Image (tube, rainbow, N blue to C red):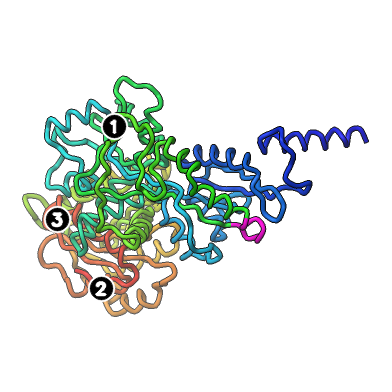
Amino acid sequence: MLAGFTVVAVVAGTLVVVFGGGGALCSTREPVLVSVAAAVDVAPVAMEAAARFNETKATTGGRCVLVQVTEQPPATVLRTLIGDRAGVLRERPDGWIADSSAWIRLARKQGASALPAGESVVATSPLVFATRGSLAQRFSVGKTEMNWRMVFPSTVRGRLKPNESEPDVVRVPDPSLAGAGIATVAAARDVVGTGPEADKALTAFVRWAQAGSAPDYRTMLTAVDDRAFWQRPVVIVPEQSVWAHNQRLSPDPVVALHPREGTISLDYPYVVTATDPVVAEASTIFADWLSGAEAQEMVRRAGFRSGDGLQGPISPGPQIPAETPKTRSSVSPEDIDEALRAWSRLAPPTNILVLADTSKHMAEPMKGTTRVGVALEAAKIGLQLFPDSTHMGLWEFAHKVGQIRDYRQWVGLGPINQPETGQLVRRGVLTELTKTINAHPRLESSLYDSILSGFREVSSEFREEMNNTLLVITAGKDDGRGVKLQTLLDRLEGEWDPDRPVQIVVIAFGSGVDRDSLTRITTATNGSLHVAQQPDEIIDVFLAALARRLCHPTCKPAA
């Protein structure tokens, strides 16, 4: 009995501390517990606000409301709310403060229909270009203004590399994890517009951004201070994260710069996610309190702007611009949602089998070398476009090149950053092969047979989380040694599965390409045909092929 009284005393003591101590409990009944998941950057002030709210002894139905806030990435919360099984929270939260309303809209579209309408905005923070103060001065002297085109590779902006007065890298938060990344994709799309050339530019941005994206703002700003990787780094983050980073003293603090075309502000919406009516009411009470004067002052003291965006941070410091940033009004919520969809289509890694033509047609002269020489030089350039998350394999094909088969496997499909056998990873093996593979002047082309075999190989090694592609590098001729064109088309149309789509992309080199036949082949799998004359055209070809992910599976035939 004494032990039991001790437990009660400890529990009661805990409750008194939680509710501020000293005063009597508002009810002898147990409190209504509300768990709130908050995005990384807003979580600290949300925790502080919850502690103050708990001291107010707010009630619902005569029971005290007790709020606990935890830091959770928006993507994890979203997966939890829509019922995914992997990468989810152990328990569904009762309230959610995301770093962008885009997450809330996406959750509703993906099945979280129970989320009530009318979420309230807790705070706002405009996106800024952040860099070290010394670099900002250097950019100013060079009359370089921050602008959204800087998120694109320099090749898209008409030069091989940035000049000395520009950032050598502009890092973007991962749009699959952070609201600032989603907004940056929307701004990039807004800058380039629409159409085939715009799609290629956006695709280049995504490939570029993937290589330097980071999971959170803290990591990005820490990288700005690290001088080991880049000479002139700039990152795109919310203004508040610059304020938070500068709470630590630095001889060269990070400064926030506004893009000249106007920026996009992140909102931090609170949405009630509880399914129990009593807990939902308690979560709503906390949401309403966060909109009040006391909570809004706490938000502004933490470096955010007010929920309505009309009041700036309290004591922002000299590194935050005093003027209110111009808004990029052409970017609407619908544009932001579309940007997230574009990223989700362009960003997934690729599972790709490269089918290289080494028949006599590839031994023909072209541009001072041979067709195969141009193709291999192009392949060497193309390899640089694929990140380490890629799965890749390589076959060569010509009639009987594999003794009893019309293809020879050099590298089996698998992770490009891992070895198939031995010590050298696939990327290294593939790079070496671009120097050593030669055409066979006496062997005829078995193009159609090899395409069918390659298509079946990728289909058998299909990976749900990747874009699955058969890339054919060829002179574009078949010598009739295997299946006929119509037979190939019939089998592709019969075996192509819209739920497990494998896309055939053909890059043909030189003149005399059978465009009509190749277009029919690629169209059967929603793929595309590209004819190249120079190795450096490969970048444009790859970007055009990858950009077709934006319209999949309703792309129009392209050649």
Query: Nearest the camera: 534 or 202?
Result: 202
Residue on which disc 3 sits: 371
Residue on which disc 1 sits: 255
Magenta region includes residue 280: yes
Residue on which disc 2 sits: 556
For marks 2 and 1, give the CA distance: 46 Å
Q: Which residue is drawn at 53% across and 66% down?
A: 113
Indicate the amino acid at tag 2.
Answer: Lys
Determine whether the residue tagged by mark 3 lies in a helix, strand or loop: helix
Indicate the amino acid at tag 1.
Answer: Val
Q: Position of residue 386 (x, y in %)?
A: 31, 48
Cβ–Cβ under 8 Å for marks 2 and 3:
no
Indicate the amino acid at tag 3.
Answer: Arg
Give the quadrant of the N terminus: top right
Q: Earlier in the sequence, mark 2 or mark 1?
A: 1
Q: Is residue 20 left or right of residue 177?
A: right
Q: Residue 79 carries which label?
A: none
Q: Where is residue 24 in the image (x, y as percent from the top left)?
A: 74, 39
Q: Which of the 4 image quadrants contains residue 239?
A: top left
Q: Position of residue 361 (x, y in %)?
A: 16, 61
Q: How many numbered badges does the structure rendering display?
A: 3
- Give the residues in magenta: 274-281
For marks 1 and 3, give the CA distance: 51 Å
